[in-house]
Amino acid sequence: MIIATAGHVDHGKTLLVHFLTGIETDRLEEEKDRGLTIDLGFAYIDDELGGRLGFVDVPGHIKFINNMLAGVGAIDYALLVVAADDGPMPQTMEHLAILDQLGISRGAVALTKIDRVDSSRLKQVNEEVTYILNQTSLADAEIFPLSSITGEGVEDLKTTLCLTASEIDSRPVDGHFRLAIDRCFSVKGSGLVVTGSIFSGEVSEGDEVYLVPQGEALRVRGIHTQNQVASHASIGDRCAINLAGHNLDRENISRGNWLTSNPHHEASTRFDMQLKVLASEGRPLANWTPVHVHTAANHVTGRVAILEGTRINPNESGLVQVVLKEAINVCMGDRVILRDQGAIRTIAGGSIVSPYSPLRGRARPARLELLRQCVDLESHHALEVMLEHATLGLTNTECINALNMKPPEVHARASTLEVEFLNETIISKQHLERLEQDLLTRFDQWHEENPQVTGLSINQFAKLLPGRCSFVDALVERLVSAEKLVKAGNTLQRPGFSSQLSTEVQALWDKVEPILSKSQTKPPVLHDLAEQLSLPPKTLEKSLNTCVQSNLLIRPVKNRYFTPAAVQELCMLLFEAAGGADFTVKQYRDVSGIGRNLTIEVLEYFDRRRITQRLGDKRKILIERNSENRGQ
């Protein structure tokens, strides 16, 4: 069980940890010289019931609240220390507010320095502490009067800590491994070591992990957890990880970075959260307030955009978007603490509802409803709600990153819902059916407005969608299989549709078709054809482009039009020129007999169509002889 101390400076946190464990947690020379805890300290002890207690000793001085916040992000238990002579002080109240906003409900109060006060004062302070606890998540915390000088009451506290540790159930290790780095140092003979708290998942020696936000892949060389060598560590553990990797540099790793097993995780510069303003605030939180943002060991600055109204009153909650000045690693459910612009006081806190917020439309009614429904949900329930609102579905990566779920976990949970899997996208059946019907209606309307055009390419078809869609190809195949679309080469059309040329274009086509069919692979250039037909080139070009849209012609080069049969013949000549190997422009020119300039233009067209690929002064064929993709 990991226990974090909390409380005002000089109330005896470090001395109490030393009495409980025999370990001096102040490790910096400045800490020892000043008798003041500045950074995080750590101590471990085997308990009487066969378990192991880990202590995170945090600084109490207001100047070092950032360090305190880095130490309490993933603890099991809070030990609030209040000196009986002073009673609750400013940092007592701020630390307690932080624990409350982090949702930490397991804990105890150590009422220290009882050797300095009489029974009347002790009773008074006990009542004061009980009162302030009752308004927080630690309302049920037991109070232990004790003295770290005489030892009175310390054993009672230690016994309770051991019993509590034995009763805490192991947390599930699902989700990607995430460790919030709070220290980084080098060990002679071992290399770089980072320490931190594991927020989710598990890690083993030899695993590949990723440094975020840098994105660098690293390998786990060794693990220490609970101050012991281990081959494995999991959620809730404090651990030290010895890392190996290319260009690994201590200067590039800092407190606030993360290690994760998710290779695709993206850092975020804006997230939505359910926020509660502290009751102690003297005024409402206004829109676009500058703040210091703390989550796990991260500390960045940003601003608060209020999503409902323009302000949130003290002791009230609301949805906000936090816009950051630099990207950090966050997931749904992560706890966040906000401090004022001067970093003097804690003003609000809460949990992340959506780690990747939109730049625009953040307060749209539909989005606000999604956020409201996701507040306080576990990831597997949130996935269902998110899919209900995602009209174009969610990609696996979006689910994995937002909810910190592994791919098999996403698939297993989604499989229990009414959804379809299209490539890497999950979409509810209801949304998919509505999307298909809307698309087909739009396509029918397009056919009515463009009767002379045979159909749409897949790229053109995608533009009928109401937004960016990651599964267009899969959607097309689904509609073709259901006989709701017909696919001819790369063109899509509705079943039963037949393009109709206008009277003017049809008359022109009747004149052009014999000329181009006769010339086959050597059609005249546009100007020569226009002169032959006694038409202005621009007029002819417009009509011939209509024939292209109707799949009667193909325009592989700028100034010539070919019949589909001619392009197919040119495509087949590729195989004759290649003879089973790569081929040159000259080889294709000799086989086709179409001249060097036209040869180059035709081959560049085949390159664009992914029929051939240029390799220096040669080309290779990318398709099979019987492929449907023959340049049409």
Image (spheres, rainbow, N blue to C red):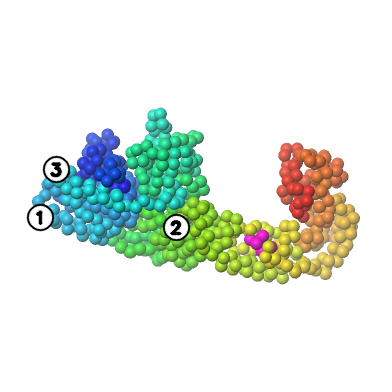
Amino acid type, label 2: Ser
Q: Which residue is mark 3?
A: 150
Instruction: Name the residue located 35 percent from the left edge and 56 percent from the top edge.
Output: 349
Image quadrant assignment for residue 223: top left
| Residue identifier under label 2 | 379
Residue 278 on image: x %, y %: 30, 59
The reply to whether residue 411 is visible in this rendering is yes
Identify the residue shown where x is 37% and y is 59%. Answer: 275
Q: Which residue is mark 1?
A: 120
Does 347 appear in magenta?
no
Decide: few, some or many residues near mark 1? Use Cα within 10 Å; few <14, some 14-19, many ≥20. Answer: few
Please tell me which residue is depicted at 45% across the width and 45% down the height of the picture: 260
Cα–Cα gap, marks 1 and 3: 20 Å
Contact (CB < 8 A) between labels 2 and 3? no
Q: Nearer the viewer, residue 147 or 506?
A: 147
Percent from the top left, x then y, of residue 31? 26, 37
Nearest to N terminus: mark 1 or mark 3: 1
Query: Label 1 sits on what residue type?
Result: Ser
Q: Is residue 445 left or right of residue 596?
A: left
**Residue interval drawn in magenta:** 475-480
